[in-house]
Image (cartoon, grey):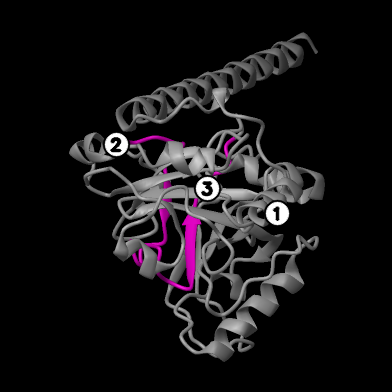
Amino acid sequence: MKNVRKILIALLAVVFVGSAAVLIRQLLQYREGAQTYSEAEELAGLPDFSKQAAVPSASASTCASAAASAPGTVYVDPYADALAAMDFSALREVNSDVLGWILIPGTKISYPLVQGTDNQYYLTHTWKKQNGVVGAVFLEYSNSRDLSDFNTLIYGHRMNDGSMFAGLKYYKQKSYYKSHPTVYITNDSGTWKYDIFAAYEVSTQGDTYRIGQHSDSAKQAYIDYCLAQSLYNTDVVPTVDDKIVTLSTCTGNGHATRWVVQARMQGTEGEIPAQAPDASAETSGGALAASGSAADTASVSAEPDTGVSSSGQLEETAPAISRTGAVP
């Protein structure tokens, strides 16, 4: 009996030591990731948004747009104006895959945006191309780098420490959406503001991940599909002339589904630029400010799901897309 007890104690001790080692390793990886992205903020000149006014709610944003349309009124978006001053040349000296920066005001989501030649590399590599469990926030490899596609997919891990795209999970609550209704992406063409219109869980084979819609009927079918999936109504309704961004991460409930937040680029109508964009930005239809730049799952290493949407609901076909941005 004593021997059995000793064996059990020894086994428990091994399990404890092993668990502690895994936890310590994970904490170290999180710390390294945080340092890596703090360095990116410094190199790119990320503004100190803690000095900005309170993050505008969905209703306040609507009021601002209405006020901007009044005669003699010029609306200046403080976030767009500040982001326009960022310079990505120093980041690109480290990694030419850097496209720009993505920010959701009032959240931890504030990262360089990169694009690789596939959807696997940046699952396990940071913006500096260093091995790291936090990975990077990255654009779907088959999307256009200039955000000109009707639907642009952006992936990021849902980390246990709340970093990367972990904060997207809070959009399950409409109250959170109301306090954080917009997404900003800044690149060489300018700063682009997106109004969130949908948040929901979807299969990795779902139509949400379709890109390449060209006809108006296919675009409208896609918009109707996404609005129908959303957990709540935001009163933001995209049109076939709009550009959409789809932010994708994991749910924490396995690998069959993903959690997505979708937003529509502002600028099609009713939006006043923070400062006049250049001609190329105007034709794109959404730049808020001309850029001066040059150039909670426990698993740590789950493999991403891959595949193509098998649904026949939408007119256009989807490319082979890895449903990434989901682990750990």
Establish if 115 lies above or below 314: above
- Whole-percent x, y for residue 141 in the image: 36, 63
Pointer 2: what residue?
Answer: 128
Q: What's the residue type where badge 3 is placed?
A: Ala
- Whole-percent x, y for residue 195 in the image: 62, 57
Pointer 1: what residue?
Answer: 62
Left or right of 20 in this view: 83: left
Report the Cα–Cα distance between label 3 and label 1: 41 Å
Pointer 3: what residue?
Answer: 302
Establish if 184 lies above or below 310: above
Mark toward the start of the polypeptide (3 vs 1)? 1
Mark toward the start of the polypeptide (3 vs 2)? 2
- Whole-percent x, y for residue 23 in the image: 57, 22
Based on the picture, tell me whether residue 189 belongs to the magenta stretch.
Answer: no
Q: What's the residue type where badge 2 is placed?
A: Lys
Mark toward the start of the polypeptide (1 vs 2)? 1
Q: Residues within 10 Å of mark 1 (few under 14, many from 20)?
A: few
